[in-house]
Amino acid sequence: MSCSGSTTCGMVNPKSFDAIDGTPIKYGSPEDYVRKTIKAERSFYAKLVDWIRTLRTFSGTYGPTTLRELRWIGHVGAYVCKDGCHGRGRAFDINRIQWIGEAVDMYSGDHASSDRTRRRRYLAVDACCRRYFKYTLDGWYNAQHTNHIHVDDHTVPILDRGSVSDTAFVQAVCNNFNGAGLRVDGVWGTATQEAFQELNRTWGYGGCDPFSSEVAYAEWCNFVMAHGFADRSASDVGYRSGVCWRWS
């Protein structure tokens, strides 16, 4: 479905919630996070449930003990009475993921942290979002998203070389896991293509086509999540694909 140009305040089947699959959500910023009930369309909420279950699985499996228990999610909004995906109840703006002993803090700009571990964990959360939500706008996308990650399900989640958001994400992944040294500018040129191919060779993502298959792209995001939560480079054994096939 397309959210652009939609009718203002157009939720069809709203659900009210203050937790996602039992995990509390808190609205605001570090100074004033509060538990409050928000709304979204039920089918979008179902995707949020899938998202948070995958987040729990990968952080708990590949991360340290500080990432074994997900405590709450910080956000700055979902449904808003306006045009677009927020006005249809099909968007969510995330600014913190809090585990029992550690957090990924979008609000404070973890994507640009001097600590590589924090950047890798941010990318792991980013990748989990992209498995389910095509339009994932993060801190590398533009200045408006340096303090939160926006997700919506505007269209099918596959990788797109023409997308600034997708390309900047791939460039950041290549830099932080394989030392590519790319300029994160959202332009898919020769250097980005070569770095992408080298990354895939290094961490063993063989034969899948994330540009045409949701399953293949989800599997690529699994590599990012596993290595990100484990804080391991692409050359370290962290995740092995079981669903790849020859590129068309």
Image: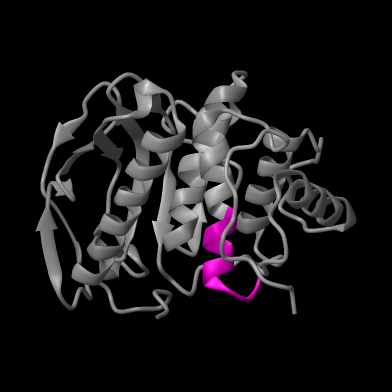
Asked whether residue 144 appears in the rendered view, the answer is: no
Q: Residue at x 36, y 44 (%)?
A: 57
In the picture, which quadrant includes the N terminus? bottom left
Which residue in the rendered view is the most extreme toward the right?
Answer: 190
Image location of residue 33, percent across then percent down: 21, 29
Image location of residue 56, percent across then percent down: 33, 42
The verdict on residue 67 being magenta is no
Q: Residue at x 36, y 28 (%)?
A: 67
Q: Is residue 7 left or right of residue 177?
A: left
Q: Residue at x 52, y 69 (%)?
A: 215
Image location of residue 248, percent across then percent down: 75, 79
Image location of residue 173, percent across then percent down: 66, 42
Q: Which residues are magenta?
A: 210-220
**Coloring scheme of the render?**
one colour
Main SS, magenta residues: helix
Q: Is residue 99 left or right of residue 144?
A: left
- Residue 55's image quarter? top left
Up-down: is 160 above or below 144? below
